[in-house]
Image (cartoon, grey):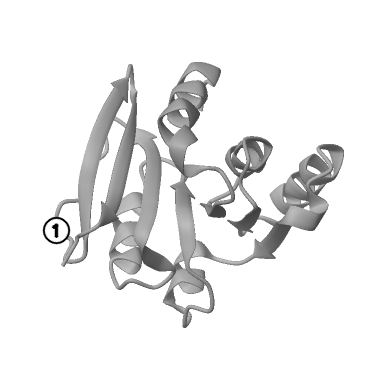
Amino acid sequence: MTSRVKASLFDILAPNLYEASVLDLFAGTGQLGIEALSRGASHCTFVELDRKVISVIKQNISSTEMDARSTVLRQNVLNFLKQPSTQLFDLILISPPQYRGLVSNTLKALDDNRHVSENTTIAIQQSSKEPTPLDLTNLQMTSLRSYGSTVLLFYEPLKH
């Protein structure tokens, strides 16, 4: 994610960050979750499968002194989302590897309301060339922002 897109993302999310519980899926180096913590989130759970990348996340968390407010899980994101939910998150960040259909599969898993409260915001970064998931039952897209070849999608639970 370019610095311009990341700045735009967090400018949009700013009202939702203070004391938020954040879930960073496909965490990569942890840059999104760490940014959320630096902007006032109370805790971030990072989920990443790659063992080498996990060590980078932990180093980045440690260098920013966010250890006490972070949990790092080495796990497949879709398997994590299929587990019974023990925690609901205020903000879910999704920035998966591109062109693998992971956004649709991840949103479908979240559509079952695991990890999602009535006030959860889901923010997704993906390529503009990938399809936008539309066939959801409990989640609705609230905004789509384009930045060149990158798209930011925002979803929230339907208000029943």
Circle 1 Cα neighbour tier, 10 Å, few/some/many (<14 / 14–19 / ≥20) = few
Residue 119 sits in which quadrant? bottom left
Image position of 26 (left or right of 50) = left
User: Which of the two residues, 134 or 105, is positioned nearer the viewer here?
Assistant: 134
Asked whether residue 17 is in view, the answer is yes
Residue 160 sits in which quadrant? bottom left
**113 shown above or below 2:** below
Image position of 103 (left or right of 1) = left
**85 shown above or below 89:** below
Expressed as whole percent of the image width and height from the top left, the position of residue 33 reads 61, 44
Q: Which amino acid lies under the numbered mark 1 shown in the image of this protein?
A: Asp
User: Which of the two residues, 57 or 140, is positioned nearer the viewer here?
Assistant: 140
Q: Which residue is drawn at 51% across and 28% down?
A: 1
Asked whether residue 132 is in view, the answer is no
Residue 113 sits in which quadrant? bottom left
Expressed as whole percent of the image width and height from the top left, the position of residue 14 reads 48, 33
Q: Which residue is drawn at 14% across and 58% down?
A: 135
Q: What element carries label 1?
A: loop
**74 shown above or below 92:** below
Q: Badge 1 is on which residue?
A: 135
Residue that lies at the very extreme toward the bottom in this rendered image = 84
